[in-house]
Image (spheres, grey):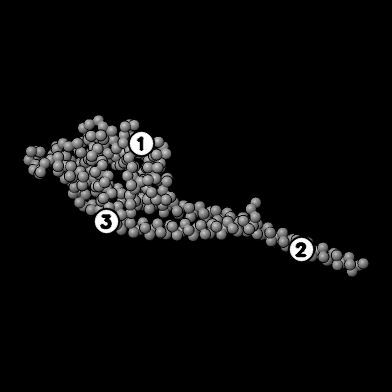
Amino acid sequence: MKALAKLKQDLEFIKGFGEVIDTIKTAALVEFRFFQGREKLINTAFLKELEGAFNLLMSGGIASPYLSADKPLPQALVIITSDEGFLGELNTLCINSAFQNRQSDKDEIIVLGERGARYLADRGDNFVSFPGISERVDAKESQRLVNYLLRRYNRHIGRITVVYPQFLSLTSQRITIFTLLPYSLTAPKLDVSRKQADMLIEPSLSKVVKSMVNLWMNYKLLEMFFSAKQAEFAARIMHLEGSTQELSLINKKVTLSYFKQLHALSDKTIREISAAKILLKKKMSITVAG
């Protein structure tokens, strides 16, 4: 059984630690709300129109390696991890999901984030690393990755799969696996009455498709980056909330132990005082009688 002084010290530590967690949680909530306000930077209307253009091309029977996999090549697995604190479990889930989706040992592993890279290095895996997503989440970050992927696509890799934590709500995140290339239709094929030869594509089919793919990949990656960053904030907030609840339970147990010992000490003191008074009266009675 702990000494009363040690229990009191534990209570003071729990109180101070709880205040630190509450401060961090409040800061994380403020950052989360501020970041959510930036999501409008992604032009979803433009992305929809771009996907409509892809739909038109594919409905017209236009063939391109970006629109269909025509070579038996390994895939690239892009894993988005976080460098923020309290997110080790989320990073582990992303990495495990990626390896479960691995089709062969020849698949190329690409990881975003130092902590994810450190985890893979500890496992002894071969991988290519990129910096983690910053709080700015600008097009330069996605373009750097797009340039690398397009240089390797259709030469060294035939499929690009992205594994990332998708934000659903403040209390819910989901590990999502998304095929970036080859592009797949997001809607049913259009009823194109004219033949492919009737379509005017300038300056050339390959250049137009490549430019569209580059632009689409940037938008989709930015969309995933925003979602992953929101999932980071949400997961950290929920982790801190869980820590607050756990600390509250510990505080109740320590407080109960403290007051039990305090009451026991008080009872002991009262009994000792009472016993001392009785002995004193007996001594006084003996003295008077003598």
Task: Assign a secondary structure to mark 2.
Answer: helix
Q: Position of residue 256 (x, y in %)?
A: 60, 56
Work out whether 284 lies above or below 70: below
- The label number, if any, that marks residue 274 in the structure image: 2
Residue type at numbered disc 1: Asn
Residue type at numbered disc 3: Lys
The quadrant of the image that shows the C terminus is bottom right
- Estimate the spatial distance between the alpha carbons at disc 1 and disc 3, rounded to whole Å: 37 Å
Mark positioned earlier in the residue sequence (1 or 3): 3
Task: Assign a secondary structure to mark 3.
Answer: helix
Mark positioned earlier in the residue sequence (2 or 3): 3
Mark positioned earlier in the residue sequence (2 or 1): 1
Residue at the image point whose x is 65% and y is 55% from the top: 3
Q: Nearer the viewer, mark 2 or mark 3?
A: 3
- Estimate the spatial distance between the alpha carbons at disc 2 and disc 3, rounded to whole Å: 75 Å
Q: Nearer the viewer, mark 2 or mark 1?
A: 1
Q: Which residue is mark 3?
A: 40
- The label number, if any, that marks residue 234 in the structure image: none
Q: Residue furthest bottom?
A: 288
Work out whether 39 lies above or below 63: below
Q: Which residue is mark 1?
A: 126
Q: Nearer the viewer, mark 1 or mark 3?
A: 1
Residue at the image point whose x is 21% and y is 49% from the top: 47
Residue at the image point whose x is 31% and y is 32% from the top: 106
Residue at the image point whose x is 40% and y is 41% from the top: 119
